[in-house]
Image (cartoon, rainbow, N blue to C red):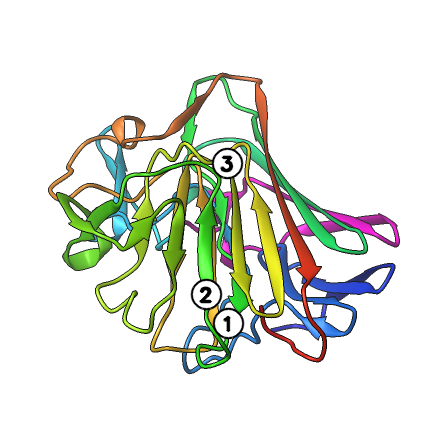
Amino acid sequence: MPDDSFILRAGGSSARFFALGAECRAWSVNGNARLWSGEADIWPGVSPLLFPTCGWSRGGAIRIGDTRYDMPVHGFAAQSHFVPTQTRDDEICFSLCDDAATRGFYPFAFRLSVTWRLTAQSLHAEIGVENRGDDPMPYACGLHPGFVWRHGDGSHRFVFGAQERAEVPIIAPGGLFSPRRRPVPLKSCQLDLIPDLFAAEALCFLDTKSRSFSFEGPKGRLTIDAPDFPHLVLWNKESAPFIAIESWTGTGDLEGFEGDFHTRPSMIHLAAGAMRRHRLCYTWQELGTGGTSP
């Protein structure tokens, strides 16, 4: 990754960002890392940006009219070079406009922006999507941060702000969403993070009532406020020391879906000339001392 990085500081916190993908690659509070390290042999991402899709597309492609377009999982934004603008020590904005490269995946005129702001305890993100074309523009967006989670370091739980259904879709081959469901051990808004919880793929909570969540352990609490994101995904790979807490506006393709991209479930259809913003805030609260994991 090129070293075109930018550092934000506020109070005892710091965060590091890259123009590639407008990605936050490090966030520390009082010297303790909150984001995982992005080990390439397990999962090289840290907090990738998702656009214009969330999840997998059937056959690795979307269809618009009679034309097929290749579409990587979670879209192309994470591999795009954004233009950075930093005007304050605690805030930076990245922007991406359509060009020949993006139109090879997604034939729409758009401007995508990501504004990151840091405070002593919180990391704020705002995704802005603008339709610069003459026709309605379908899209989905999200963030996919992986937070430090050391499995053997005490019990951990994920707490929902409201009671949710104790079931999630089964993930079919190719990462597609099956209409079938499987149960999860969610009790009284609390999901205990037991070792084999992710053995059968990610947990995708769709159309949640909650818009605020917390990831809690013996040393701290991470609160996630996601007022503009109806879907929540929790994921871990190979018992690595992280938990991905993903906020999505849309979902992956349904098993057997062959429709036009405009008819993909849970898409946002942005009118010509319109703009929409999607906010997220991650807040860390220490409950103990001497540790780097919740």
The mark that comes first in sequence, 1 or 3, is: 1
Which residue appears at 24% of the width and 30% of the height?
A: 260
Residue linked to disc 3: 211
Residue 12, x across and y down, in percent: 84, 64
Report, in whole angstroms, how far the alpha carbon at label 2 lies from the one at label 1: 6 Å
Q: Residues within 10 Å of mark 3 (few under 14, many from 20)?
A: some
Q: Residues within 10 Å of mark 2 (few under 14, many from 20)?
A: many
Report, in whole angstroms, how far the alpha carbon at label 1 lies from the one at label 3: 22 Å
Residue linked to disc 2: 243
Residue linked to disc 1: 149
Residue 244, x across and y down, in percent: 46, 61
In the depicted view, which residue is nearer to us: 70 or 204? Answer: 204
Q: Does 94 appear in magenta?
A: yes
Boundaries of the magenta span: 75-102
Q: Could you say whether the residue bearing mark 1 is in a helix, strand or loop?
A: loop
Look at the picture and state if 246 lies above or below 196.
above
